[in-house]
């Protein structure tokens, strides 16, 4: 396993170690990977890790494909995945109308076709045999609470929508063209420089299958490292990938297709005219099957701003709504929850993890109600994630100034500044409160 992945999973491994001590029959990571393969292949309902076979079967039968990208043994979204693989009664009759392919690693993945938010551990593509994408499903806006974003009921609605699009195909092919993205930086994950020397295009079931696996989030890590090494600055469309609509005040119902649950007051979504209960039929002309489809359109909207036009079904009528996005709109999103944020912290913050103080904690520290006050929750202990540690930063220090700036109230904002405005190799002064005293250290961006 790569060093960044090992560090990113440190908390999970600690929990796993405790569980193993309490439950001697708990499965190892290797057993989970091999067990998943044996279980799915024996059942025969899913094609296992063989996309070529899936496309050939779809072409032969005229059926659409469902391709599930699922990192094993990542525990996030495990309940959703189990319900899908074990053929939940709501899904079984729908799944039987698809050629079903399960992909459990990113090794050899065709990134010209499979473009998605790689900080997920569960992503679904709904496609035609000619590689036309009907839609995507699966997202997450929190490290653990995936139920705010996805559900079995929502997946069933997406499957129904894909079947309707498939029935209308190819008359709707032009509408679907933009669901396939532009050429990627590299055609497959193992082509990225960060991964090229460590991984091959296939899993090594004859050896250490776990260490041979490229996890989805490692693609994002490799992409950001590529831009960092190429020019120093990580562009906004790479740093703030697949913006969540809730950052724009648009809260979607995880039980439905692409349906508005609520709209935040004084948000871009409210100003655009979205209302609770609206069903988003299309965005920029693309049919919507899920929250992930909404994110796809947002992802391909310029960071400098632009209009996103929606056709929505409200009470008794269809109307057009235009979401006007201003320059810098992506920065409204939160990236601190992402697994890949650990690598971003190494690059920009010396590998320290910070969280905003609550109003009660501010009062306890005699700090004003506004301004920067970020408590250090964790400091990396091992190279190359030990920059802050070597500089003298301690857990529970309170960051109040970074490079002379005192206006960052979220870790996300601090990361964006460090990675887009401060050159690599810069010595950055950072001031902390420690036991009521100010302490200033120098952090070096990497």
Image (cartoon, rainbow, N blue to C red):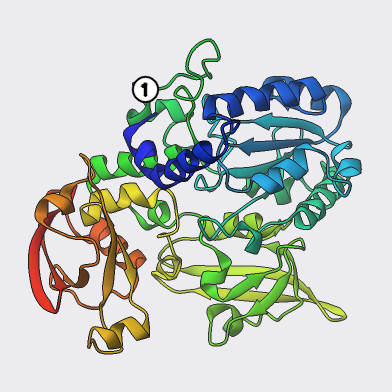
Q: Which residue is mark 1?
A: 198
Residue at 83% across, 40% down:
87
Q: Is residue 428 above or below residue 29?
A: below
Task: Answer with the quarter of the image where residue 434 lies.
Answer: bottom left
Q: Is residue 117 visible?
A: yes
Q: Helix or strand or loop: what does disc 1 sit on?
A: loop
- Residue 324 vs residue 161, the one in the foreground: 161
- Outermost residue to the top: 206
Residue at 36% across, 85% down:
359
- Residue 325 vs residue 400, the one in the foreground: 400
Expressed as whole percent of the image width and height from the top left, the position of residue 366 reads 22, 88
Q: Is residue 406 left or right of residue 327?
A: left
- Residue 240 vs residue 408, the one in the foreground: 408
Q: Is residue 328 left or right of residue 259?
A: left
Q: Quadrant of the N terminus?
A: top left
Q: Is residue 54 visible?
A: no
Expressed as whole percent of the image width and height from the top left, the position of residue 269 reads 59, 78
Expressed as whole percent of the image width and height from the top left, the position of residue 152 reads 77, 53
Q: Is residue 266 left or right of residue 358?
A: right
Residue at 61% across, 73% down:
250
Task: Answer with the quarter of the image where residue 169 lies.
Answer: top right
Total marks in image: 1
Expressed as whole percent of the image width and height from the top left, the position of residue 289 reads 74, 56
Label 1 crowding class (10 Å Cα cut-off): few <14, some 14-19, many 20+? some
- Outermost residue to the right: 93
Q: Is residue 300 left or right of residue 9?
A: right
């Amino acid at each position: 396993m790569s060093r960044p992945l090992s560090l990113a999973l440190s908390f999970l491994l600690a929990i796993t170690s405790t569980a193993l001590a309490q439950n001697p029959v708990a499965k190892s990571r290797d057993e989970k990977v091999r067990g998943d393969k044996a279980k799915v292949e024996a059942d025969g309902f899913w094609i296992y890790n063989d996309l070529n076979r899936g496309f050939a079967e779809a072409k032969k039968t005229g059926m659409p494909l469902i391709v599930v990208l699922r990192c094993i043994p990542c525990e996030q979204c495990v309940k959703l995945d189990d319900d899908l693989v074990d053929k939940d009664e709501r899904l079984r009759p729908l799944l039987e109308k698809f050629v079903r392919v399960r992909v459990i690693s990113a090794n050899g993945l065709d990134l010209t076709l499979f473009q998605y938010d790689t900080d997920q551990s569960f992503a679904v593509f709904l496609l035609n045999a000619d590689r036309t994408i009907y839609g995507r499903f699966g997202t997450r806006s929190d490290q653990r609470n995936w139920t705010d974003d996805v559900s079995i009921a929502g997946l069933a609605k997406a499957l129904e929508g894909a079947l309707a699009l498939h029935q209308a195909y190819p008359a709707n092919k032009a509408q679907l063209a933009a669901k396939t993205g532009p050429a990627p930086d590299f055609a497959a994950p193992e082509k990225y420089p960060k991964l090229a020397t460590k991984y091959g295009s296939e899993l090594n079931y004859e050896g250490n299958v776990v260490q041979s696996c490229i996890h989805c989030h490692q693609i994002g890590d490799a992409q950001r490292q590529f831009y960092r090494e190429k020019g120093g600055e990580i562009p906004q469309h790479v740093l703030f990938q697949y913006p969540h609509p809730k950052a724009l005040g648009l809260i979607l119902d995880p039980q439905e297709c692409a349906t508005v649950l609520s709209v935040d007051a004084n948000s871009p979504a409210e100003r655009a005219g979205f209302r609770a209960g609206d069903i988003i039929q299309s965005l920029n002309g693309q049919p919507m099957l899920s929250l992930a489809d909404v994110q796809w359109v947002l992802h391909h909207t310029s960071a400098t701003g632009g209009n996103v036009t929606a056709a929505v079904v409200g009470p008794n009528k269809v109307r057009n709504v235009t979401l006007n996005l201003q320059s810098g709109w992506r920065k409204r999103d939160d990236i601190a929850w992402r697994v890949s944020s650990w690598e971003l912290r190494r690059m920009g913050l010396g590998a320290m993890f910070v969280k905003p103080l609550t109003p009660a904690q501010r009062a306890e520290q005699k700090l004003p109600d506004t301004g920067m006050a970020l408590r250090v929750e964790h400091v990396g202990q091992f190279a190359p994630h030990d920059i802050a540690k070597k500089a003298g930063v301690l857990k529970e220090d309170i960051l109040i100034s970074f490079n002379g700036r005192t206006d960052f109230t979220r870790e996300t904002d601090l990361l964006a500044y460090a990675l887009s405005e401060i050159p690599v190799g810069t010595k950055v002064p950072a001031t902390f409160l420690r036991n009521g005293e100010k302490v200033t250290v120098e952090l070096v961006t990497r």
